[in-house]
């Protein structure tokens, strides 16, 4: 598929956008299928208010943003290799008279609005793709074999870019009354994620609230899913290794029986976590692999069990590591074995602030329509946007990308398709949040 797409681009006229060249065939929007159901009716903001201005500016950018999204989609880059994507975004911001600043490695931040005013608001997009094959079978499918924008980060990046361009126009005519920072973060899909690098580079300096969107292919375009409190989960890797001198199974009293001790770890440690941590925190330790021994009559000298520790609640997650270590040590203590616990923390849950969630909901109802807000569920997936929310309040909303009545897709699948009207919805929503 990649070779076919590449062949199609040879020799076609190319238009330029800053330093990055966009093939002509990516520049025109996909023709709308007349049989395709239309999105729910848009809201357009209160007449004469900032919402109406944002809607008009977003209309002007719509086709260009679709082109940019397709360009990013056709040229996906994996975590910490988002060089072209960074250049493309940077060039477009510069063309609007803004001054983006590169982050160490890849990614960028861009400040706009009156810098002397307080209450800086950050809008964050992630920009990396996944190491899997694009199977979307569209003219702008990935041209890089084995790499695809299968988590919708091309849409996130384009929506934040579009919101930034709208806000820059408002700023130019004195209608933006607070400072705004656009954050285009690399490496969301790996651990440790790029959010920690952005924070370490000062990306949150002076920021008092932060917002982000994530594509949700189970929600119709034109709608957003919100939830106060956690909307994703923590997922940590756990491995426990038990060792002793080993011996004959007829004489377990002369050695540490690692198989028996490991069995105690497997059954008792999850039970201890379930009693020491609030059950409402959804803490769950589930083993996925266990290895020990090779003969029916020999006690091995070592054995390991590995699993994941998931948790729905930030405070329980912070406490769970210590409980895990204590529980393992105490459970194996009677059996005179050595034990090593490796607990690799992933990301905390994304925990939406009540005021931030309300801000997203209010903006959505005004810009996307009164019926545009849905209650979303808490997923067991992880998102490194969570790290920002441990520093400043804010919220993430799920941005609907399903064509109403159309097929459902899932993220992290090579055939993911999004209804590109989601970009426009994201632009309106984020720009309105930043102008409230
Ligand atoms: Zn993802
Ligand atoms: Zn993602």
Image (tube, rainbow, N blue to C red):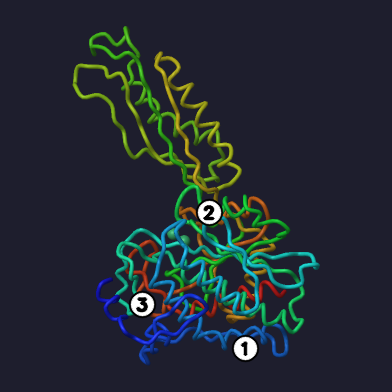
Element carrying mark 3: loop
Which image quarter: residue 9? Answer: bottom left
Instruction: Give the mark toward the camera: 1 or 3.
Output: 3
Residue 98 image point, x, y percent:
65, 74
Q: How many marks?
A: 3
For label 3, being within 8 Å of ligand 2 is answered no
Q: Work out whether mark 2 precedes mark 3 in sequence or the reverse, and give the earlier one.
A: 3
The reply, left or right, for residue 367 in relation to residue 176 is left
The one nearer the camera, 56 or 67, is: 67
Using the image, determine if residue 202 lies above or below residue 409: above
Q: Which residue is located at x 41 percent, y 59 percent?
A: 78
Q: Which residue is mark 3?
A: 140
Q: Is residue 403 left or right of residue 164?
A: left
Pinpoint residue 162: horizontal percent, then vertical percent.
57, 77
Residues 378 and 122: in front is 122
Residue 304 at x, y percent in the picture: 34, 29
How crowded pointer 1 is (Cα within 10 Å; few <14, some 14-19, many 20+) is rated as some
Q: Which residue is mark 1?
A: 56
Cα gap from disc 2 to disc 3, whole angstroms: 27 Å
Q: Dot 2 corresponds to which residue?
A: 194
Label of residue 94 in the image? none
What is the CA distance from the residue labelled 2 to the residue labelled 1?
Answer: 34 Å
Q: Are marks 2 and 1 in contact (CB under 8 Å)?
A: no
Q: Secondary structure at mark 2?
A: helix
Q: Mark 3: few, some, or many residues within 10 Å (few <14, many ≥20)?
A: many
28 in relation to 153, above or below: below
In the rendered image, the quadrant that contains the N terminus is bottom left
């Amino acid at each position: 598929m990649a070779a076919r797409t590449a062949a199609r681009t040879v020799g076609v006229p190319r238009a330029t956008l800053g330093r990055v060249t966009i093939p002509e065939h990516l520049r025109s929007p996909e023709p709308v299928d007349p049989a395709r159901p239309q999105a729910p009716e848009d809201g357009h903001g209160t007449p004469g208010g900032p919402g109406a201005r944002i809607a008009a500016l977003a209309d002007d950018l719509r086709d260009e943003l679709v082109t940019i999204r397709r360009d990013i989609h056709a040229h996906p880059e994996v975590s910490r290799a988002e060089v072209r994507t960074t250049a493309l975004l940077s060039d477009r911001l510069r063309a609007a008279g803004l001054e983006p600043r590169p982050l160490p490695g890849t990614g960028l931040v861009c400040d706009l609005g009156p810098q002397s005013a307080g209450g800086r608001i950050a809008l964050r997009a992630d920009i990396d793709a996944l190491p899997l094959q694009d199977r979307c079978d569209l003219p702008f499918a990935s041209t890089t074999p084995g790499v695809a924008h299968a988590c919708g980060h091309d849409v996130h990046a384009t929506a934040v870019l579009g919101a930034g361009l709208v806000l820059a126009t408002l700023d130019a005519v004195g209608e933006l009354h607070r400072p705004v920072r656009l954050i285009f973060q690399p490496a969301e899909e790996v651990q440790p994620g790029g959010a920690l690098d952005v924070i370490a580079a000062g990306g949150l300096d002076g920021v008092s609230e932060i917002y982000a969107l994530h594509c949700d292919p189970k929600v119709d375009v034109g709608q957003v899913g919100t939830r106060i409190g956690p909307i994703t989960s923590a997922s940590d890797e756990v491995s426990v290794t038990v060792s002793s001198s080993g011996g004959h199974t007829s004489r377990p009293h002369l050695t540490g029986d690692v198989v028996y001790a490991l069995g105690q770890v497997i059954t008792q440690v999850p039970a201890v976590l379930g009693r020491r941590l609030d059950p409402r925190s959804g803490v769950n330790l589930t083993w996925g692999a266990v290895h020990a021994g090779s003969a029916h009559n020999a006690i091995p000298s070592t054995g390991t069990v590995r699993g994941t520790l998931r948790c729905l609640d930030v405070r329980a997650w912070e406490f769970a590591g210590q409980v895990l270590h204590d529980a393992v040590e105490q459970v194996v203590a009677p059996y005179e074995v050595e034990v090593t616990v490796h607990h690799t923390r992933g990301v905390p849950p994304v925990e939406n602030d009540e005021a931030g969630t309300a801000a997203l909901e209010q903006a959505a109802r005004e810009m996307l329509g009164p019926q545009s807000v849905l209650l979303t569920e808490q997923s067991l997936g992880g998102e490194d946007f969570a790290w920002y929310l441990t520093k400043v309040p804010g919220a993430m909303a799920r941005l609907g990308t399903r064509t109403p009545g159309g097929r459902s897709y899932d993220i992290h699948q090579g055939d993911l398709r999004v209804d590109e009207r989601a970009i426009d919805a994201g632009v309106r929503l984020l720009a309105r949040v930043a102008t409230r």
